[in-house]
Image (cartoon, rainbow, N blue to C red):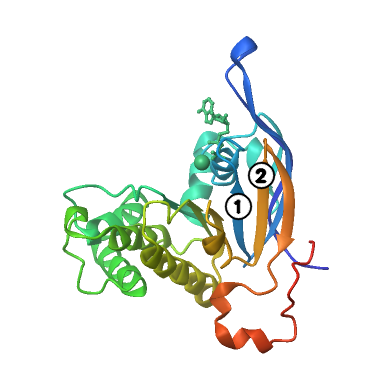
Amino acid sequence: MTAIMLIELKGVTKTYGQGATALQALKGVDLCIEAGDFVAIMGASGSGKSTAMNTLGCLDTPTTGEYLFNGVHVEKLSRDQRALLRRRYLGFVFQGFNLLARTSAQENVELPLLYRGEPARQRHAAAKKALDSVGLAGWEHHTPAELSGGQQQRVAIARAIVTEPAVLLADEPTGNLDTQRSHEIMDLLWKLNIDHGITVLMVTHEPDMAAYARRMVRFVDGVVADDARNPHPVGLGPDAGSAPQAASQQERV
Ligand code: ADP
Ligand code: MG
């Protein structure tokens, strides 16, 4: 076992508020994630999934415990250092797409590069390439209102990958989509994982979507209650059934 741990949470707690109204959303989370993995995070509403994702995404810091990203102690970084780490290594996709209205797909996707101060020519080229890779060539000049929900989520994914992140964090990315569109988005996430080697961390309520992941982590009441490898992720396609590692039972990690 010499796998490189990209992400390590050690005894992470998160408390919102203080005194009598304090609420402990995370109660000691231990979680290691290898580079290149595809992890589904499941659990009931209020179990701490989004809090864990915000911590992993360097949007928020643990109250206690350690978070190592590529061996760097994130909990010891300043706010600005965390922002740099975020911009350099992480991409985000949300349930509600979070695109700028009245702004073209192209401009939405260019935004993270604008923050990085990249020149216009490079921004245009990179955004076009990202939109191509999510199947939206030809839709560059449409605004969110002119796109379907599935297309809007594709734009959001293009925006998340335009910076070539190491990790894609997706919090219920198919939560607002119908089944067909959800599977298309999952196929896309799977492809990004396989073809681009992007580590994918995805929160989902839906077992059909979690089935694409290589690993399933279940949160219960602020802790990781269950953590299992998926021996046969859906994204492997029908041919994978004959693969020697395919087994009918989930192995424990
Ligand atoms: P999940 O994503 O699994 O539904 P969350 O991580 O959003 O769960 O929430 C875990 C718990 O923390 C919930 O009880 C929620 O109400 C609480 N919580 C989440 N964010 C905040 C916040 N910013 N302030 C106070 N409480 C919060
Ligand atoms: Mg949530």
Q: Residues within 10 Å of mark 2 (few under 14, many from 20)?
A: many
Name the residue at 56% across, 85% down: 238
Name the residue at 68% across, 67% down: 230
Viewer-nearest residue: 81 or 217: 217
Of the numbered discs 1 and 2, the one sitting upstream in the chain is 1
Image position of 84 with respect to 47: above or below: below
Q: Quadrant of residue 178?
A: bottom left
Tag of residue 219: 2
Tag of residue 27: none
User: Where, quadrant-wise, is the C terminus in this rendering?
Assistant: bottom right
Q: Is mark 2 within 8 Å of ligand 1?
A: yes
Q: Which residue is mark 1?
A: 41
Please state if 180 lies on the left or on the right of 234 as rendered.
Answer: left
Please state if 109 lies on the left or on the right of 69 as rendered.
Answer: left
Q: Which amino acid type corresponds to the residue marked 2 in the rendered image?
A: Phe
Task: Classify mark 2: helix, strand or loop.
Answer: strand
Task: Classify mark 1: helix, strand or loop.
Answer: strand
Viewer-nearest residue: 130 or 15: 15
Q: Which amino acid type corresponds to the residue marked 1 in the rendered image?
A: Ile
Q: Is mark 1 within 8 Å of ligand 1?
A: no
